[in-house]
Amino acid sequence: MMRPPEIKDDPMYQLLREEKIAEFNERRASGESCDLRHADLRGLDLRGLEAKSLNMIGCYFRQADLRGINFSATNLEQASISGAKISGTYFPHALTADEISLSQQHGVCMRYKK
């Protein structure tokens, strides 16, 4: 069963909600951790996010601006990108083009190929 997207108290998550991407990246680079599993990130402009090694399982990216983000080393299993802007976005190799397209067009949760 799918978990609903969550609004979290985590201060790092709140930086993303406020679209303070540069500050998020700086704090993360200095060792601060964050819990983004099942996070509600709908409608946010996340361009410039350094996503390497983030666990974004089950994240909800509806209508978010994800252009140019490198998610190749990010866990996006069960995430949904319905209506998101994804031009120039790099996705993990475990996600097929069909999975990405189905999620972007119909909101289905992306499944990794086994």
Image (cartoon, helix red, strand yellow):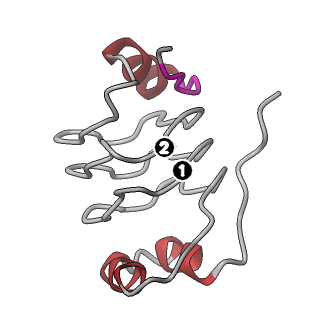
Q: CA distance from mark 1 to mark 2?
A: 5 Å
Residue at the farthest right position: 1
* Front residue (pair 17, 92): 92
Residue 82 percent location from the top left of the image: 48, 33
Q: Residue at x 43, y 17 (%)?
A: 99
Viewed as shown, does residue 10 lie left or right of 90?
Answer: right
Q: Residues within 10 Å of mark 2 (few under 14, many from 20)?
A: many
Image-quadrant location for residue 33: bottom right
Most frequent secondary structure within the magenta stretch: loop
Q: Secondary structure at mark 2?
A: loop
Judge whether residue 47 is colored magenta: no
Q: Which of pointers 1 and 2 lies earlier in the amino acid sequence?
A: 1
Viewed as shown, does residue 13 lie left or right of 51?
Answer: right
Residue 59 percent location from the top left of the image: 58, 47
* Front residue (pair 90, 84): 90
- 8 shown above or below 85: below
Q: Residue at x 42, y 35 (%)?
A: 83
Q: Which residue is mark 1?
A: 56
In this picture, which residue range is highlighted in magenta?
107-112
Q: Which residue is mark 2?
A: 75
Q: Quadrant of the N terminus?
A: top right
Number of disc labels: 2
Circles 1, 2 touching at the beta carbon (< 8 Å): yes
Q: Residue at x 30, y 42 (%)?
A: 72
* Front residue (pair 102, 26): 26
